Amino acid sequence: MGIQVISRDGQPEYAVVPWEQYQALLAAAGQAPVAAPATHNVSEPADASLSSLDQLASLRVAKGLAPEQLARSVGISPAYLAMIEAGERRPDAAILRSLAWHLGVSGWSEPS
């Protein structure tokens, strides 16, 4: 099972599972399947990606997101986001994917 655990302050906070596995877990628990969520609309050009953190702050500003808003959506502190934007910290893969997802750019899922 391809489970991703997202932690905050050293404690597990979220478990992310692939959609098909989530549906299987629901079925095993005797619950009805859930309809797929609406597709995330990407308003950036098709070649926009989070491959470089140098442009993270400008992407956030272009999306009209306050640093606190993006940080809380991703599950990190605003101070940690500021360190990432300043190039002082390199986030792990889970945070990178979450940042890319919330910014609506490619890089939020690993290539197959």
Image (cartoon, rainbow, N blue to C red):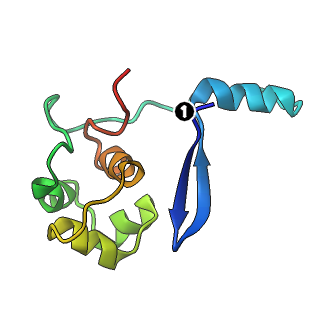
Q: State whether residue 75 is above or below residue 103.
A: below
- Residue drawn at x 39%, y 50% is 98
**Count of marks, rendered view:** 1
Amino acid type at mark 1: Pro
Q: Position of residue 50 (x, y in %)?
A: 21, 45
Report which residue position mark 1 lands on.
Answer: 37
Residue 90 position by quadrant: bottom left
Front residue of this view, candidates 9 and 34: 9
Q: Is residue 34 visible?
A: no
Q: Position of residue 41 (x, y in %)?
A: 33, 35
Quarter of the picture containing the C terminus is top left
Quarter of the picture containing the N terminus is top right
Residue occupying the far bottom of the picture: 79
Left or right of 83: which side holds 75?
right
Q: Position of residue 75 (x, y in %)?
A: 46, 64
Front residue of this view, candidates 77 and 34: 77
